Image (cartoon, grey):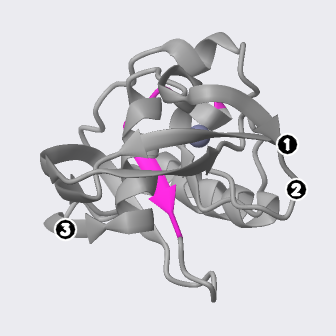
Amino acid sequence: MALRQIRIMGDEKLEKVCRPVKEMTPKLKQLVQDMLDTMYDAGGVGLAAPQVGILKRIVVIDIGEKRNEPLVLVNPEILEQSGEQTGQEGCLSLPGQAGMVTRPSHVKIRAYDENMQEFELEADDLLARAICHEVDHLEGIMYVRHVEGELFEVTPEEEEE
Ligand code: ZN
């Protein structure tokens, strides 16, 4: 298990647009594994490659309670979005804080998995929120840009992305 250092808001890597992955290499597979290890270790529900300093369009998400069903999204693209949900959001790059963010309640995406197999996925509620949050990271956008009202402090046990 290899943990990578999570960049904290203010780090310039978190403000860059990430590049698409053209082919899956052993190095990138290792990155995906390290991102999963790092996400689970930090107790997060999602992590994007720029959060560990790599400007590639790769995201890992696991919103399951058992923490064993990771979703790996390479070059994710939101095809459709609908509805609206407003809820608390946090980020591993801004530990200890959260804010209220409105997101679509439903998204349809296209992405590639860690073997570069293309797939489409429809997601609702928390998963839709996590996908939108992580895809934003690939565009250099932190959720604080969408926050309504003030950020507030949270205990470390609460979910962060
Ligand atoms: Zn985040």
The picture places residue 83, in percent across and down from the top left corner, at 21, 54
What whole-number distance in Å separates the C-alpha atoms at marks 3 and 2?
30 Å
Q: Earlier along the polypeptide chain: callout 1 or callout 3?
A: 1
Q: Nearer the viewer, residue 29 or 84?
A: 84
The picture places residue 98, in percent across and down from the top left corner, at 71, 41
Decide: marks 1, 2 in contact (CB < 8 A)? yes
What whole-number distance in Å separates the C-alpha atoms at marks 1 and 3?
31 Å
Which region is colored magenta?
53-62
Residue labelled with disc 3: 121
At mark 3, the secondary structure is strand
Q: Residue at x 39, y 24 (%)?
A: 18
Q: Amino acid at mark 3?
A: Leu
Residue 96: assigned label? 1
Most distant residue in the left direction: 79
User: How dense is the environment of label 3, judged by Cα within 10 Å: few (below 14), some, or many (20 and up)?
Assistant: few
Residue labelled with disc 2: 156
